[in-house]
Image: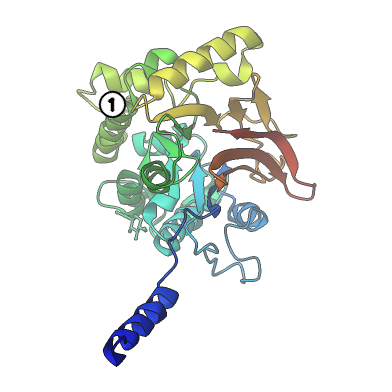
Amino acid sequence: MPSTRLILFILCALVLWWLRSPPTPLPRQTAPITRRIVAVADLHGDYAHALAVLKMAGVIDAAQPSSSPRWLDTSGQTVLVSTGDLVDRGDDTQALYRLFDTLRSQAPTPQHVRSCLGNHELMNALGDWRYVTKGDVDSFPGGVEGRRHAMSTQGWIGQTWLANSSLTHTVDLLPRDEIRQAQELQGLSTSYLVPQANFVHGGIHPSFAAAGLAKLNSIAHSLLHRALTYAAINGEMFPPATPEEERQLYSEMGPLWYRGYAIDANEKHICDLAVDARRKLVEDAGSSSVDYLVMGHTPHLEGFIHRCDPPSVHLIDTGISRAYGGAQSALVFETSLSQESGVWTEERRLIALYRGRKPKVIYERKRAV
Ligand SMILES: *[C@@H]1O[C@H](CO)[C@@H](O)[C@H](O)[C@H]1NC(C)=O
């Protein structure tokens, strides 16, 4: 006859077996990995239009009075990129640089707000003030001298240029850490390349792309620092002892001024150049791929110009500023990666936003990866 103890033991074992946590299978579906990149070009001294565009794109709170813009997205999915030229042609230089610094401090990390330098930032730093308005000069305490000081290594605009902007930014279209995690733990192929877009003011010709992103940014930073230190000496374009590589960077073929992607009508030639530049701009071949080149600088007032097939070259200066009166626009990259029953699917959408018009899908692609 089995003892009471044995019966108790068997009962306990049964209860424990029944209570045991079920084995955790890989979830059939994981939360999608997503990112939304909003790019704006050539704001040229027009704070009101800048606010209108950022509200339209859902970057700042539309309900806020215009005096206190507020970064909206707390999820970390949104990244804002400016392709430069906040200054000149309009009066609102200070308000615009303050706006970008404010958004940078409100966003989840400073990396969520990327500022490129334009040729006009460098012109002002170098003392070439041909496009500065009287209203803008008057907006600075101390007028010309006050403005010159603000745009020096000692001044707040010069300092935020040096600390918070770069010649060019390459931005991941999806958060890289989440991709890595999906590759390590959730069966996403290790050969999946993080898609990227490169942003610059003018355009990066392959002869410049060959230097690589980090080198281009460091040459620009050095030229900017030199310009802010020695602006407007003897009316020369460059401060004394400016090295050749910095002069070249600021040349007509350089990334701040180049217009080839915007004005060369030979589509084949431009798309070949773009493929070459994109390949040279990749910093870590084997883990990412620069699929898009985005630039401002050459206004097309009606709307963006998208070139090549699939569209990989995007010219997004639409003359947002009152000085031009063009379309008030933002280009949006929406990308997501989701998993269902072990199959990973990537979706990309490129959307053109124009104030007062319906959003326009420029490109859409869905594929298993
Ligand atoms: C850079 O931007 C931050 C906002 O994130 C701002 O607080 C800071 O003052 C800027 N840096 C400089 C040197 O101006």
Question: Which residue is drawn at the image coordinates 46% and 27% (left, top)?
Answer: 290
Asked if residue 271 shows in the view, the reply is yes
Relative side of 362 to 241, left or right: right
Which residue is farthest right? 357
Which residue is farthest left? 241
Who is closer to the viewer here, 24 or 319?
24
- Quadrant in which residue 89 is drawn: top right
Q: Which residue is mark 1?
A: 215
Q: Position of residue 40 (x, y in %)?
A: 57, 43
Q: In which quadrant of this rendering is ligand 1 seen?
A: bottom left
Which quadrant does the N terminus fall into? bottom left
Q: Position of residue 272 (x, y in %)?
A: 54, 10
Q: Amino acid at mark 1?
A: Lys
Who is closer to the viewer here, 170 or 25?
25
Q: Position of residue 39 (x, y in %)?
A: 56, 43
Who is closer to the viewer here, 43 or 108?
108
Q: Position of residue 298 (x, y in %)?
A: 60, 28
Question: Which residue is drawn at the image coordinates 27% and 31% (left, top)?
Answer: 218
Relative side of 188 to 283, left or right: right
Q: Is 24 located above or below residue 325 in the figure?
A: below
Q: Is 124 located above or below residue 298 in the figure?
A: below
How many numbered marks, from 0 up?
1
Q: Is 101 located above or below residue 251 in the figure?
A: below
Question: Which residue is drawn at the image coordinates 62% and 17% (left, top)?
Answer: 263
Q: Residues within 10 Å of mark 1 (few under 14, many from 20)?
A: few
Q: Secondary structure at mark 1?
A: helix
Asked if residue 43 shows in the view, the reply is no
Badge 1 residue CB within 8 Å of ligand 1: no
Which residue is farthest bottom? 4
Relative side of 230 to 318, left or right: left
